[in-house]
Structure formats: C-alpha cells, structure tokens
Image (cartoon, helix red, strand yellow):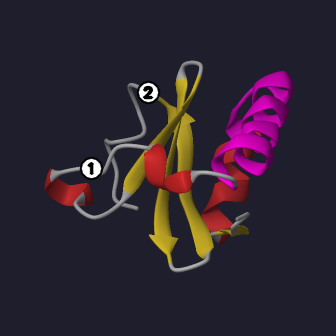
Amino acid sequence: MAYEVFYKKSVGRDLKRLDRDDAGRVLEEIELVLAKNPESNPTLKGRFAGLRKFRVGDHRVIYALMEVKILILRVDRRQDVYKNEV
C-alpha cells in the first residue's frame, strides 16, 4: 500500500539549503522508499515524540505518519535536524 506524501512549506527552504544533488536524492528516496513502507522507520523520543525519522545518507527526514498520509516536517543534515523545533 503506497502512502500519499505531503510536505510542510518549510521543507522547501530546507531543501534549498542542501546541495542540488543531495536534495534530489532525498526527494527520490522519499517518493520511492518511504512512501511504500513508512512504518519500518524508528519513532523518535523527547521533543519529537510520536514523529518518525528516515535516513538518506547524512540527511534525516522527520515526518508524521497519519493513517494513509505522510507529512514531511523537516529535512536537514543529521547533526542539525534536531536542533530547532519542527
């Protein structure tokens, strides 16, 4: 079952900060891999409790899983993605 993927407006800014190749790779992985099996990724704890993370190389995608929808909340490098609020 494929999930429908939605993006928060701020994700566009997140992707613009990445290298063009990295941003393309992240988007491709979201559409091809994450949309097919989002339940397999770990649930976060602490400030981000209830959200999930998806790894794409050195980048992390923070997302919320809702029934048949995936809401992408943040995309950033591993060391920076957890520093600010979602």
Identified by mark 2, the residue type is Arg
**Residue 42 vertical placement versus 22 (above, below):** below
Question: Which of the 4 image quadrants contains residue 72?
Answer: bottom right
Q: Which residue is mark 1?
A: 44
Q: Which residue does the image show at 71% across and 31% down from the upper left?
A: 18
The percent position of residue 86, horizontal first and vertical second, equals 40, 62
The local crowd at label 2, few if under 14, some if 14 to 19, many if 20 or more residues have their Cα within 10 Å, is some
Viewer-proximal residue among 64 and 84: 64
Label 1 sits on a secondary structure element that is loop
Q: Which residue is mark 2?
A: 78
* Magenta part of the chain: 17-35
**Gap between marks 2 and 1 measured at Cα:** 14 Å
Q: Which residue does the image show at 60% across and 51% down from the upper left?
A: 37
In which quadrant of the rendered image does the N terminus lie? bottom right
Q: Are marks 2 and 1 in contact (CB under 8 Å)?
A: no
The percent position of residue 47, horizontal first and vertical second, equals 19, 58
The local crowd at label 1, few if under 14, some if 14 to 19, many if 20 or more residues have their Cα within 10 Å, is few
Label 2 sits on a secondary structure element that is loop
Q: Earlier in the sequence, mark 2 or mark 1?
A: 1
The percent position of residue 8, horizontal first and vertical second, equals 62, 69
**Would residue 73 be counted in the magenta stretch?**
no
Identified by mark 1, the residue type is Leu
Viewer-proximal residue among 1 and 51: 1
